[in-house]
Amino acid sequence: MDRLVFLLATGLARGAVLALFALSLVIVWRAARVVNFAQAAMAVCAVYTAFALTAASGSYWLGLAGGLAAGALLGAAVERGLMRRLPHLTPLPGMICAIGLVMVLQSGLAIAFGPEHRPMRPPFSQSPFMIGGTPVLSPYDLFVLVTAAAAMGAFALLFTGTSLGLRLRAAAFAPETSRLLGVRVPRMVTIGWTLSVATAALAALLLVPTELGLNPHAADLLFVNAFAVAVIGGLDSPTGALLAGLGVGVLVSLTTGYVSASAAPLAVLALLTVVLLLRPGGLFAAREARRA
Amino acid sequence: MSTLLRAALITLAAIAATFGLDPFRNYQLATAAGVFAAVAGLTVLIGLTGQLSLGHAVLMAAGGYGYAAAATAVEDTAPDAAVLLTGLAGAAAASAALGLLLGLAAARLRGPYLAGLTLALVIALPSAANVLPLGGEQGRSAPFLPVPEALAALIAVEQWHAWLAILISAAAVTPLVLLRAGRPGLRMRAVLGDETAAALCGAHPGRVKTGAFVASAVPAGLGGAILAVATQQVAPGGYGLAFSLMLVVAAVIGGLGSIGGAAIGSLLVVTLPWLVDTAVEAVPADLGQRLNGNLAVLLFGTVVIATTLARPDGLAGLLTRLRGARPAPPDAPEPRPTASPTAMPSTNTER
C-alpha cells in the first residue's frame, strides 16, 4: 500500500512534466501544423544555457529564467530562419527538417560540451516527506507539480482570456479568415513557436535534476513519451495533453515500480497502439479538426 | 523486361566491383547493400504514399531475428544454400507480419500519428528484446556461411558475403522497382494525391496504404537478413533510434521515391561516417573524441535540412537535372499533391 501511494505520487509528478512537454507539442502543432521532432534537442540547448548561467552566478533561479529565455529565442529563431521557408502543403517537409535539426543540435552540443552527464542540483531537497510513515512526495516533486500547474494555468488564461490568445487561436484555426480580419498570422505562428519551445525548456529544466544529469540526449525519452502523450490526447487538445500526461506518468511509474524499468516503453507502446486503433485521432480530438 | 535486364547488369557490375575491394571494404559493401534494401523500401513508402515511418530499423531487426531463428533451426541438417534460403524466408515472413500490423494501423492514421507510433516502436525494441524470447541485449547469433568449396581458392569470406548481400539486395529491390513502375505504384500516387478521388476511381485507400507498408517492410526485413549474414548476429543495439533516423536520412538525401537515390543515400550513410571518423583521428585526442561519431551526424543533419529547403527531390533529382533529362523549375516549390511528378522522378528517369 505504501509503495502504491509512493508510486502514484511520483507518477503524478512525472506526469506533470510529461503533460507540460506534451502541451508544448500541442501548442506548436496548433500554431503551425508541425510536429516538432526537434523539441527535445531545442529544450536541451536551453537547459545547457541555464546550466552555464547557474554555474556562473550560483543562482538556480537566474539559470531558470535564462533557460526559459534561451528556449523562447531559439523557438523564434528556428521558426523565422528555418520552418517558415518550408513548403506547408504536406506535413512531411516540416517533420523531416526537424529530424535534421535534431541531428545538428545534438551532435553540435556533444561536440561543444562532450558526451558526459553533468549533474544538475535541484533547488529543493529530493528526499520524500513522510506522512504517517509512508514516503510521499519530495519538496522538489511538489515544486515540479506547482510550477507545471502554474504554467498550464497561465496558458489556459492566455488562450481563453486575452486578446493575444484569441488571435493565436484564430490564426491557428482559420489563417485566411484571420488575415482578412487583421490578425498578423505569421507573427502569431512565431509567437506559437516561442511559447512552445519555452514551455518545452521549462519541462526539460524540471526533469533534468531528477535524472542522471545533463547530456545532449537528456530529454530524448521525455520527448518520446510526451509525443505519445500528445498523440493519445489528440494533437489538437491541451486538455487531452494534460489528462493523458498524468495518466501516462502514473502508468510509467507503476510499470517501473511493479514490473521493471525496461517494461515501461512497452507499456507506453501498448497504450498508444490501443488508443490509436480505437480512436485514430486521439482521445480528445475535436470531430471537426482541420485536416493537416 | 528492360528493368530485369538492367537489374541483372547492375548486380553483375556490383559483384565485379567486389574484386577491386579489400575485405573491410567488402564488408562495408555488404552493409551498404543491406541498408540499401531497407532504404529502397522506405523511400517508396514515404515518396509514393507519404507515410513517414521512423521505425524501419525495427522492421530490419524483425527480418534479422526471423533470419536467425529460421536459419538456426535447419543449420545442422541442411546444406548451406538451404540454410540461407530458409533464413531469408523467415526474414521475409517476420518482417511481412510486423509490416502488416503496422500497415493496418497506418491505414487509419495520418502523418504525425503514424510517425509517433513508429517512434514508440523503435524506443520499445530493446525492452521487447528482453521480454520476448529474443536473447536480450546479446541478441541471437546467425549461422556462419562459409565460402563454397568451388570458390574457396578464389575469394575471401568477406567477398563471398558481399556477393550474397548484393544478390539478396537485388532480389529484394527489383520487385519494388517493378511495383513502383506498375499499377500498384500508380495507385499509391493516386492515394497520396487525393484519397477521395482515388477511392472514387476504385483504389481503396486503406488497402493501398497497408499494401504499401507490407511491400516496404519485406525489403527492409531482407536488409536485416543481409546484415545478419554479414555479421552472424542480430542484437537490438544495432537497430536503435539513431540507425532508424539514418535510414530516413538516406532516403531524403537520395531523393524521396527514387530507388537510384536510395542506393546513393545508403552508400553515403555507410561510408561517410567511417571516412569522417578516419579523418578525425588526425586531430588532437580530446577534440577528436568529441568529434568522433558526432561530426558525421552534424554533416548529415545539415545536408537533410539543406535538401528539404533547396531540393526536395534530393540527389536523384539533382543528377537528373544535371543530365538535362528533365527540366525542373529552378526553385522547385513543394508540389501540390496532385502534381507529384515534380517531386518523384518518373520511371523513365530512374537509375
Image (cartoon, helix red, strand yellow):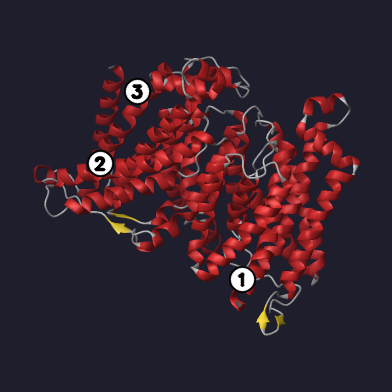
Residue B90 lies, in percent from the top left, at 27, 45
Figure quadrant of residue B164? top left
Q: Please state the chain letter of the residue tagged with numbered disc 3 in the rendered image.
A: B
Same chain for the residues under marks 3 and 2 in the image? yes
Dot 3 crowding, Cα within 10 Å, few <14, some 14–19, many 20+: some
Residue lying at 47% horizontally and 46% vertically, measured from the top left: B244
Amino acid at the residue labelled 3: Leu
The span from disc 1 to disc 3 (Cα, nearest Å) is 55 Å
Amino acid at the residue labelled 1: Leu
Q: Is B307 left or right of B316, judged from the image as shown?
A: right
Q: Mark 3 points at which residue?
A: B178
- The circle on residue B139 is none
Q: Are dots 3 and 2 in contact, CB under 8 Å?
A: no
- The N terminus of chain A lies in which quarter of the figure? bottom right
The span from disc 2 to disc 1 (Cα, nearest Å) is 46 Å
Residue A172 lies, in percent from the top left, at 76, 35
Same chain for the residues under marks 2 and 1 in the image? no
Residue lying at 59% horizontally and 66% vertically, measured from the top left: A253
Seen in the picture, residue A13 relative to B194 is either above or below; the reply is: below
Q: Is A40 left or right of A256, judged from the image as shown?
A: right
Looking at the image, is mark 1 or mark 3 nearer the viewer? 1
Residue A62 lies, in percent from the top left, at 82, 65
Which residue is more in the foreground, B156 or A258?
A258
Q: Name the residue under label 2.
A: B89
Q: Please state the chain letter of the residue tagged with numbered disc 2 in the rendered image.
A: B
Figure quadrant of residue B40? top left
Residue lying at 73% horizontally and 59% vertically, measured from the top left: A49
Amino acid at the residue labelled 2: Ala
Identify the element where label 3 is drawn.
Answer: helix
Q: Name the residue under label 1.
A: A7
Identify the element where label 1 is drawn.
Answer: helix
